[in-house]
Image (cartoon, rainbow, N blue to C red):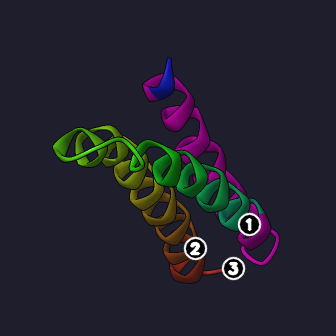
Amino acid sequence: MLIAGVIVLCVLLFVLAILAPRLSRHPEQASKRALGLGGRGASKAPGKLGEWLAKPFHKSTKAAGKSADAGRDVRDKMPV
């Protein structure tokens, strides 16, 4: 379920960044904040378990940022 949600989020951020690059910054930051909160909560588990539980949240945060950046790059390269 988390994987499908992250995929939908990345696609949404990508499309939004192509259509309105400035307006895509706020949803990108909100998604990073929400995923960061999940990662911080998961990292409270003891030992290696905390690292393992937080890893999907950190990777998802990176993916959301990369997809929004890619959308803005595509918009910059458009001849419009």
Q: Quadrant of residue 22?
A: bottom right
Q: Which residue is mark 2?
A: 72
Of tags 2 and 3, the one toward the viewer is 2
Q: Specify the principal SS of the magenta part.
A: helix
Q: Earlier in the sequence, mark 1 or mark 3?
A: 1
Q: Which residue is mark 1?
A: 24
Q: Residue at x 38, y 54 (%)?
A: 58
Question: Which residue is most to the front?
Answer: 46
Q: Which residue is mark 3?
A: 80
Q: Earlier in the sequence, mark 2 or mark 1?
A: 1
What is the number of the mark on residue 2? Answer: none
In 3D space, how far apart are the residues under numbered discs 2 and 1 (Cα atoms)? 9 Å
Of residues 51 and 33, the one drawn nearer to the viewer in this rendering: 51
Q: Amino acid at mark 2?
A: Arg
> Along the horizontal axis of the image, is 24 left or right of 71?
right
Q: Earlier in the sequence, mark 2 or mark 3?
A: 2
The magenta region covers 3-26
Q: Residues within 10 Å of mark 2 (few under 14, many from 20)?
A: many
Identify whether 77 is placed above or below 46: below
Residue 20 visible somewhere in the drawing: no
Q: Residues within 10 Å of mark 1 (few under 14, many from 20)?
A: many
Q: Residue at x 50, y 65 (%)?
A: 65
Whole-percent x, y for residue 34 in the image = 65, 51
In 3D space, how far apart are the residues under numbered discs 1 and 3 (Cα atoms)? 19 Å
> Along the horizontal axis of the image, is 43 left or right of 41?
left
Q: Amino acid at mark 3?
A: Val
Q: Amino acid at mark 1?
A: Ser
Of tags 1 and 3, the one toward the viewer is 1
In 3D space, how far apart are the residues under numbered discs 2 and 3 (Cα atoms)? 13 Å
Helix, strand, or loop for circle 3?
A: loop
Instruction: Look at the image and say whether residue 17 sits in the magenta stretch.
Output: yes
